[in-house]
Image (cartoon, helix red, strand yellow):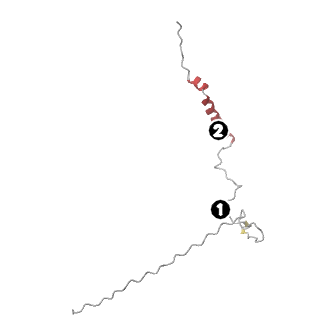
Amino acid sequence: MEEVIINEPSLFQVLVSSPTTYIVLLIIGMTIYQLKNGKSSTKCCESNKTSTPSKPKRARKNGKYVGDNPKTAKNEAWVGGKAPKKKAPKKKATKKTPSKKAVIKRTPKKGGK
């Protein structure tokens, strides 16, 4: 009879034969490539200058406010052409007048000195 000796595969042979190894190496390589070229996949840090500002700002010319021309549809007094919505005025709290309690008249005690 012949003896068959089965050698366990080495760690290197397991890694080379596994497809997940190639996927992990591809992800690591792409990350290093993006970092070296300065291209970040996240857009959280970049400011979006094409969108309208979150808070409306008054338009200025030479440091002074620009007025609105009522003949045009666009509002020139605000950057972006839209004025902020006017807030409703706060209602003043009405003071309640306290109700008068019934006054009990006290009469002095009779007798005594």
Local crowd size for mark 2, using a 10 Å CA cut-off: few (<14), some (14–19), many (≥20): some
Q: Secondary structure at mark 1?
A: loop
> For mark 1, does the 10 Å Cα neighbourhood hold few (<14), some (14 to 19), or many (20 or more) residues?
few
**Residue at far left of view:** 112
Q: Nearer the viewer, residue 92 or 53?
A: 92
Tell me the CA gap for discs 2 and 1.
Answer: 37 Å
Query: Foreground residue, 79 or 89?
Result: 89
Residue farthest to the right, as pictured: 71
Against 78, residue 20 (above or below) is above
Which residue position holds label 2? 31
Question: In the rendering, at what x and y percent does residue 90 appear?
Answer: 57, 72
How many marks do you count on the picture?
A: 2
Select label 2 or label 1 by which is in front: 1
Could you say which disc has been placed on residue 17 in the image? none
Q: Earlier in the sequence, mark 2 or mark 1?
A: 2
Q: Amino acid at mark 1?
A: Lys
**Which quarter of the figure has residue 104?**
bottom left
Q: Residue furthest top?
A: 1
Left or right for 11, reference 103: right
Percent from the top left, x then y, of residue 40? 66, 44
**Which secondary structure, mark 2?**
helix
Q: Residue at x 24, y 92 (%)?
A: 110
Could you tell me residue 87's position as x and y percent?
62, 69
Identify the amino acid type marked 2. Thr
The image quarter in which residue 109 lies: bottom left
The answer to the question of whether label 2 and label 1 lie on touching residues, with beta carbons closer than 8 A, is no
Quickly name the residue at label 1: 55
In the rendered image, residue 82, in percent from the top left (x then y), is placed at: 70, 64
Question: In the rendered view, does 5 fall on the left or right side of 78?
Answer: left
- Front residue of 18/97: it is 97
Examine the rendered structure and indicate whether residue 5 appears above or below residue 60.
above
Q: Is residue 66 above or below residue 19?
A: below
